[in-house]
Amino acid sequence: MEHMPEPKLFNVTECVVECMLDEVLHEEKMCTCRQCRLDVMALALNHLPPKYVVSEQGKAFEIYRLQGLAQSRVTVYQEILRAAQIVKQRPHHKRQQA
Ligand SMILES: [Zn+2]
């Protein structure tokens, strides 16, 4: 039986952020736990315009490659960096609220 790829809604901006995330976290020498990673992604993505495409599974990376390169990487990088600095100061994994 043929397994047809399923079309999915896909935010290219999210993929670009995800792909650049590790680089920024490493440079900032900050925590890379799941909580912190998702916090940084959420903060960054709230400041970046989403770019939705409908794609079959497996083509996602191809779309990232094509559109991710065309997108302003400097803008994305700056937003991740800004978000990383916020999360670094007040990481949710520690629950430091008084
Ligand atoms: Zn953490």
Image (cartoon, grey):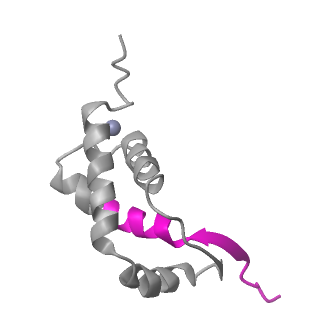
Q: How many marks?
A: 0
In the rendered image, the quadrant that contains the C terminus is: top left
Q: Which residues are magenta?
A: 1-21
Between 45 and 22, the residue placed more toward the observer is: 45
Establish if 34 lies above or below 80: above
Please state the quadrant of the image where ligand 1 appears: top left
**Membership of 83 in magenta stretch:** no
Q: Position of residue 53 (x, y in %)?
A: 62, 77
In the rendered image, the quadrant that contains the N terminus is: bottom right
Could you tell me which residue is drawn at 46 percent across and 79 percent down?
Answer: 64
Establish if 7 lies above or below 50: below
Q: Position of residue 90 (x, y in %)?
A: 30, 30
Residue 46 left/right relative to 4: left
Q: Position of residue 37 (x, y in %)?
A: 38, 48
Establish if 9 lies above or below 32: below
Q: Quadrant of residue 93?
A: top left
Could you tell me which residue is drawn at 38 percent across and 48 percent down?
Answer: 40
Q: Position of residue 88 (x, y in %)?
A: 26, 38
